[in-house]
């Protein structure tokens, strides 16, 4: 087999079936039995091979369980409140501390609080002691020969304490499975190399290494291997010898440079190529030298899920641990989800508890969008043969974050601006148990989400054409009868972002109709798009006469990035985005960027904290440093 | 203040109030602000100090999102199924792989599956391409300047991937708080030293070190400090300089050798001494050099809880992390719990799902019983001012183990024998997702728990005096009308355990009445106790004539340990326990040790696995090695 073989046909096996088929090849008590003996003190999170029995009892003698005096029970009989008894040091009693040794003939302890010292050698007691009272008999804690831990037990801090107390000082544990990670691809470069066009930074292997660590394995990363059949073959052969499990990243799909599957067919057995999941479809599950060798797709999100689907269970299996399903909660979908019947689909979601209802909002679904994984609070699985769910459906979501964190998250759904990121950051810094989550759906999306009760706040900047005023009219129109308020945030400078030095000499909205000017727009419902449409109408320009009117970006930063890269000449957006991307900016107007909020939320403890942060000196300084913002009305409340 | 000061008065402040009072002294943004810059690749589980913004977009160019051909969208218009269009290599199209760079003038990708190659330089297409289809525009994943992580964010594997993709290579994180751990006490010795009477192995500091590690701190253990005022003072002073937090273990209560509180009063401020919890009452919460210095009681269970109450929140606080409450479930108490009104009490529980009901059984409550912590599946908090709960009450339990593990645990409640430990171990080894939990309440306790539906199986060995037969008669009597079965396990040899060489020349039950013979008994309801009573009755001996008849141990091993240590001369028990403690054994009888089980449980998948393990060659070999067991009927089922 050679370079020109293309593999365009993948199987479409359901995930569970694929896991079952593949994992049967690795029967754990045969496949992975490497062990090592280590000191108990260093054994946290390691897994026992054999049961461990106490070598000595603890306590190893009869020990006082209280501070007080040791007595001979029999000789205290008769002592009462009304008829106290005196005891002599060294005859009737001795002082003892907690943990002290009870020597013959002493067989009971009276607490220090319950005696009176008459003199240095005499005490008085007021009730009789029962034999063995306040005594920790030998072996109370741990009895010699008792089983402290079973085999296949993951060692916790209290286990370390118990083992040492039972005089067990070393323990045989399973070696951590060694996972070889091979990044491949002629287009990828190391993080430390200089980034050039056509090159992509190799980051997946670093994510894998961290996941291996987290799941109890030992990562072993190889250098990047170019797309060369023989190089890939040699590296996999070597890695299969040197590790217990091998990952090959990218090259698993069906393109002209995807050699991995052919290499694996030559040097081992490909059990499965292609599973019915999205993301993650083009995975390769192979066996080389009796060991699992897995080809993982290159997109970061696919890479993550394939690791979770196949590597995590293997690592748990090799560590003799039961894979926990993860905490699940019920949540209501804020948006419709359409999914293919062909795949089981894994949807990343933002979650937020809004007025006692857990709301789930889908994030971007592209396999390439790493940030959707970073931002996700939970995962929804849409089964194969299911078309998706309507908005308002209650679904079961697997949490990626602790529920407490989600319960203390202020949910913002609406227009995006950098000030929201900075606000969220500052809020969390000042209140470590609070979070701000922002979904970017544009101003109209924000108003609609308010109507449906999906969020706590909605950042909006909507120009009313007839009056030239912002926001109030829209709230009146779309949220009639609801008690809403506008929490004034910033005025911001909107303008045209153009390439550095303005090579196409763009001066205003009129220039957008020029043939050689490539525009990039914002998505429908975005306030910035409404602003554009307002100016187009004002100047009697047809949208169809603007090149790129249909090319949509969802954030100011994305628009600025498109301009900076030269893929567009011009876009409408805010000054701060232009500044941070280093493009030029032609101011058009100031607009009001406010937070829409139901009036009743103004009493919400966490919203009060948010307003405090908005008004704080620290936050105002940060905003002013950005430039292009006016903060003089910040924190004012206008009820509507 | 000197050696002789006793501190017998502790305060009794509720836990939450104590935490609040104490923690206000350590305002996190002032107290703990040490940071360091580390490579992103090594930043797993570390916490960001500042928000992190992408330094470059990813992709940093317009990249193909599919394997296929790059085309100029405009030039494909008009291509249809019925009217295919041919394109020439280098003019109308170029081949591209996923991730390949789309150079001008190409602005769309057609998938490899959707083209036909006519010859090396010509392809045919069957539909027009839309501009930017299957293209990952620059910044789709991450936009230059976009916030990837906020401040105070604990870095996960996907965050590492995203940061590197955004060209962020190093990160400023909080230093891990350094926790100095000082073990004190003249009676404690290092694990490596030889154990002598009156000495106790120091194991708490090792448990603390593991807990510190687990909660994101860096442990720094000091050598054991003898009970000497000045030595303790010097060590605490040094530790307060060298660490961010200091723990002093033991010496926190009110005995004659408890100097810690006085030392702390001299060199710093004692904020609180004594909280209203059990275990954990005699904690000392102090401040030295502006840092938290905490005196922790010596009992392992108290030590654990005090760490959870005060150190864990501090470590989370210093790491800017929200403390998660832990997963809670509802469970039904199998036994009554009596608790003092004075304290909030933390009860360790075994949990098991028995026929769809989650059953909670309290473990031993002594603060010294480390094994109660090792065995615990969950914690029940009985509030202050509450007397406890009746059996059958539904309570809320905080889990210490994953719920899956508890759901797959076979619950055994009844008589204890080493073979149960070995069976549980073997079951888990052969089936890593299954567990056997054993509560030791004696044979009658086992029958009663069956009646109440608290467990899956009950190991029993109950002699019917009239017939000399085992078990069946008791099941008939106490579980009338229920469809029960006996799963035959082992016959075991019961006899008198005596000290090595049998110095008191004990030959049989009659010798127990001798004045100089100190006996140690089993608890009420234990089959072994019933056997003793049977022989006493048979030989017309009054229980009151047996010295030590009232001294109760709950396991064979504990009885054997008492004999081995010389604290008793003799006890009734099984051969295996005598053997493993190295005491002599005078056989009295063989008895049937069987597993009582409801008939319907015999179809339970997990019970079927248990029986398989019982009958397995490996398990039988292990039992025979112990000696004193007869396994010929193992696995037989007798329905009753």
Image (tube, coloured by chain):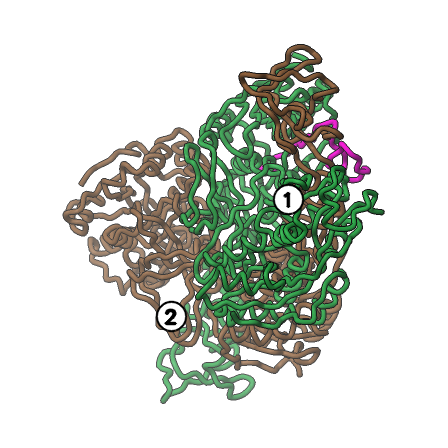
Chain colours: A brown, B green
Q: Is residue B108 left or right of residue B536?
A: left
Please give the chain letter of the residue carrying mark 2.
A
Q: Nearer the viewer, residue A425 or B288?
A: B288
Q: Nearer the viewer, residue A601 or A230?
A: A601
**How many marks on residues?**
2
Q: Is residue B170 above or below residue B61?
A: above
Can the viewer see residue B82 in this picture?
yes
Specify the principal SS of the magenta part.
Answer: loop
Expressed as whole percent of the image width and height from the top left, the position of residue A614 reads 35, 35
Which residue is the extreme one toward the front? B540
Q: Is residue B556 above or below residue B429?
A: above
Expressed as whole percent of the image width and height from the top left, the position of residue A372 reads 45, 57
| SS at circle 2 | loop
Q: Nearer the viewer, residue B555 or A477?
A: B555
Q: For the magenta stretch, what is the residue range?
A: B174-201
Q: Is residue B565 left or right of residue B357?
A: right
Asked whether disc 2 touches disc 1, contact meaning CB atoms under 8 Å apart, the reply is no
Measure how far apart labels 2 and 1 are at the Cα level.
80 Å
Circle 2 residue: A339
Q: Residue placed at 45% from the left, 59% from the top?
A: B140
Local crowd at mark 1 within 10 Å, few (<14), some, or many (≥20)?
few
Local crowd at mark 2 within 10 Å, few (<14), some, or many (≥20)?
many
Expressed as whole percent of the image width and height from the top left, the position of residue B546 reads 68, 42
Can the viewer see residue A372 in this picture?
no
Question: Residue A289 appears in which quarter of the rendering?
Answer: bottom right
| SS at circle 1 | loop
Residue B187 among magenta residues: yes
Please give the chain letter of the residue carrying mark 1.
B
Circle 1 residue: B542
The image quadrant where one finds the N terminus of chain A is bottom right
The image quadrant where one finds the C terminus of chain A is top left
């Amino acid at each position: 087999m050679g370079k020109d073989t293309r593999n365009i046909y993948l199987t479409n096996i359901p995930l569970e079936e694929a896991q079952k088929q593949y994992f049967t090849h690795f029967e754990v008590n045969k496949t992975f039995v490497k062990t090592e003996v280590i000191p108990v003190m260093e054994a946290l999170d390691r897994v026992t091979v054999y049961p461990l029995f106490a070598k000595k009892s603890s306590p190893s003698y009869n020990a006082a369980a209280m501070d007080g005096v040791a007595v001979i029970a029999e000789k205290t009989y008769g002592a009462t409140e009304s008829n106290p008894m005196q005891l002599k040091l060294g005859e009737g009693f001795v002082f003892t501390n907690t943990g002290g040794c009870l020597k013959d003939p002493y067989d009971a302890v009276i607490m220090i609080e319950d005696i009176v010292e008459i003199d240095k050698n005499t005490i008085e007691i007021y009730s009789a002691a029962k034999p063995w009272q306040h005594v920790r008999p030998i072996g109370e804690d741990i009895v010699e020969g008792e089983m402290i831990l079973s085999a296949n037990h993951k060692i916790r801090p209290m286990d370390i304490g118990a083992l040492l107390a039972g005089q067990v000082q070393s323990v045989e544990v399973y070696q951590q499975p060694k996972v070889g990670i091979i990044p491949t691809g002629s287009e990828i470069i190391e993080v430390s190399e200089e980034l050039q066009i056509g090159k992509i930074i190799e980051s997946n292997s670093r994510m894998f290494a961290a996941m291996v660590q987290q799941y109890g394995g030992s990562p072993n990363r190889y250098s990047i291997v170019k797309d060369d059949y023989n190089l890939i073959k040699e590296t996999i052969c070597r890695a299969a010898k040197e590790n217990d499990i091998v990952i090959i990243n990218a090259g698993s799909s069906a393109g002209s440079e995807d050699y991995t599957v052919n290499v694996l067919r030559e040097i081992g057995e490909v059990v499965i190529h292609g599973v019915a999941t999205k993301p993650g479809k083009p995975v390769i599950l192979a066996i080389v030298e009796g060991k699992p060798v897995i080809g993982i797709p290159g997109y970061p999100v696919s890479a993550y899920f394939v690791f979770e689907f196949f590597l995590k269970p293997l690592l748990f299996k090799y560590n003799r641990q039961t894979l926990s399903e993860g905490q699940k909660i019920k949540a209501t979908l804020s948006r419709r989800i359409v999914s293919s019947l062909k795949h089981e689909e894994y949807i990343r979601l933002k979650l937020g508890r809004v007025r006692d209802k857990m709301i789930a909002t889908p994030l971007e679904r592209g396999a390439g969008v790493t940030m959707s994984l970073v931002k996700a609070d939970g995962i929804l699985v849409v089964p194969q043969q299911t078309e998706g769910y309507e908005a308002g459906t209650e679904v079961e979501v697997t949490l990626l974050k602790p529920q407490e964190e989600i319960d203390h998250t202020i949910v913002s759904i609406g227009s995006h601006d950098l000030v929201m990121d900075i606000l969220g950051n500052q809020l969390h810094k000042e209140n470590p148990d609070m979070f701000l989550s922002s979904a970017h759906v544009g101003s109209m999306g924000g108003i609609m989400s308010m109507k449906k009760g999906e969020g706590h706040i909605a950042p909006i900047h909507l120009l009313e054409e007839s009056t030239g005023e912002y926001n109030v009219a829209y709230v009146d129109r779309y949220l009639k009868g609801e008690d809403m308020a506008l929490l004034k945030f910033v005025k911001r400078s909107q303008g045209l972002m153009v390439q550095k030095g303005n090579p196409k000499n763009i001066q205003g909205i009129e220039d957008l109709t020029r043939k050689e000017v490539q525009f990039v727009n914002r998505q429908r419902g975005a306030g910035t798009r409404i602003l554009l449409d307002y100016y187009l109408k004002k100047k009697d320009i047809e949208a169809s006469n603007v090149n790129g009117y249909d090319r949509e970006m969802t954030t100011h930063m994305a628009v600025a990035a498109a301009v900076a890269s030269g893929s567009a000449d011009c876009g409408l957006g805010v000054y701060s985005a232009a500044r941070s991307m280093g493009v030029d900016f032609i101011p058009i107007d100031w607009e009001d960027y406010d937070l829409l909020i139901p009036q009743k939320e103004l009493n919400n403890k966490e919203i009060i904290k948010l307003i405090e942060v908005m008004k704080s000196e620290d936050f105002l300084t940060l905003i002013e440093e950005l430039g292009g913002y006016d903060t003089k009305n910040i924190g004012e409340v206008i009820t509507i």
